[in-house]
Amino acid sequence: MKQVYIAIQGTVAAFIAWLSAKMGILLPVMGVLMGMMVMDYITGMLASKREALDHPDDPAYGWCSRRGAEGIIKKVGYLCVIAVAMVVDYLILRVAAEAGFEVATKAFFGLLVAVWYVLNELLSIIENAGRMGAPVPEWLIKYVSVLKNKIDSQGDGTEERVR
């Protein structure tokens, strides 16, 4: 049994090493994103439960399996958009290599989109905590929003250049 466990460990380690070599900095960001997605889903369910307790006679409040399924589908959509951004990165690298140019980074658009989604999930978790009754510092909401907007402007190419 111990040999099977060691073989599974080795296989998982080799797969993670291969992913790390292919994805670079994007791999840990994707790990953080996955964690934030799970946390957002859980805090969303807890916030809905809290609202149902606060408004027992109002069917508009509370957890609904339909809304839960919609949340999961939305998160799968996030991963699809990140995959598209990664394909764009790959195409840029391949075309640049064929044209004889060297591109300094492996992941730009994929990383930008993934970090944007991490910040989106963080804002949602903060919002869910507020719905649960936790006091949320206003400066934290503003700081995460500013970071998200900064990435939005970076993606638009409208960020002001520092001289």
Image (cartoon, grey):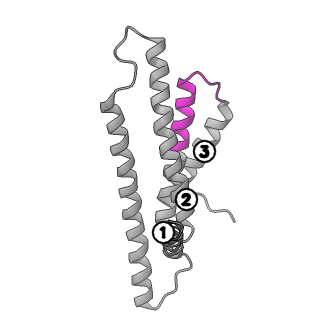
Check disc 2 and report the residue beneath it: 29
Q: Is residue 30 magenta?
A: no
Q: Earlier in the sequence, mark 1 or mark 2?
A: 1
Q: Which mark is residue 85?
A: none
Q: Is residue 31 visible?
A: yes
2 and 3 marks in contact (CB < 8 Å): no
User: Which span of residues is magenta-colored?
Assistant: 120-136
Amino acid found under the numbered disc labelled 3: Val
Q: Looking at the image, tell me whether mark 2 or mark 3 is earlier in sequence order.
A: 2
Residue type at mark 1 is Val
Q: Quadrant of the C terminus?
A: bottom right
Q: CA distance from mark 1 to mark 3?
A: 49 Å
- Residue located beneath label 3 in the image: 146
- Residue at point 30%, 32% (across, down): 66
Q: Do callouts 1 and 2 mark residues in contact (Cβ within 8 Å)?
A: no
Q: Secondary structure at mark 1?
A: helix
Mark 1 surroundings: few (<14), some (14-19) or many (≥20) residues within 10 A: few
